Image (cartoon, grey):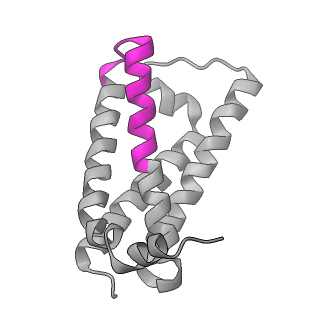
Amino acid sequence: MSTTPFEKIALGVSGLTALAIGGFIVSAPHAFYASYGIALGQDASLLSELRAPGAALAGFGILMPLGIWRRAILPASVAVALTVFLAFPIGRLVGLVLDGLPSGSVIAALVVEIAIAALLVAAFRRRLKGPALQAHAAHPVR
């Protein structure tokens, strides 16, 4: 099954978004978090703890669009994109319930993450329901 233009757009948007955010966190965590109204200070441990997942997000951002050009990587690209853009909003929603209402910038990020998640689910819904997944369900790995 070839990749549709809609699927390519979804992987491109998710990949560029993850790469940009992850790269910004790694290279300029103070500026990134200041945009959310968060002052970080100079604690090297805290900065390290923020840069590490930022680097992971950037790496996932590279992997997501690779599936556009490398068919063998497509399942991993889709899985990573869906995981990232479903997990982030879930984490934010848990925070909303447990911690209360965050800043407007964080709510805006939540809205963008939900929009990208919806884009990905819409783009890959036929693959998520496709025969490859149904065949796996019929013949589980032992």
Q: Nearer the viewer, residue 112 or 47?
A: 112
- Which residue: 25% across, 47% down? 115
Q: Quadrant of residue 140?
A: bottom right
Image location of residue 94, percent across then percent down = 43, 25
Q: Quadrant of residue 28?
A: top right
Image location of residue 108, percent across then percent down = 29, 32
> Quadrant where the N terminus lies?
bottom left
Q: Is residue 17 above or below residue 31?
A: below
- Which residue: 52% across, 69% down? 76
Residue 65 showing in the rendered view = yes
Q: Is residue 103 above or below residue 107?
A: above
* Magenta part of the chain: 85-104
Image location of residue 118, percent across then percent down = 26, 52
- Which residue: 44% across, 39% down? 88
The residue most toward the top is 100
Image location of residue 134, percent across then percent down = 39, 74
Q: Main secondary structure of the magenta part?
A: helix
> Quadrant where the C terminus lies?
bottom right
Asked if the magenta segment contains residue 96, the reply would be yes
Q: Quadrant of residue 26?
A: top right
- Which residue: 65% across, 39% down? 51
Instruction: Say whether residue 13 is left or right of residue 31.
Output: left
Q: Nearer the viewer, residue 104 or 129?
A: 129
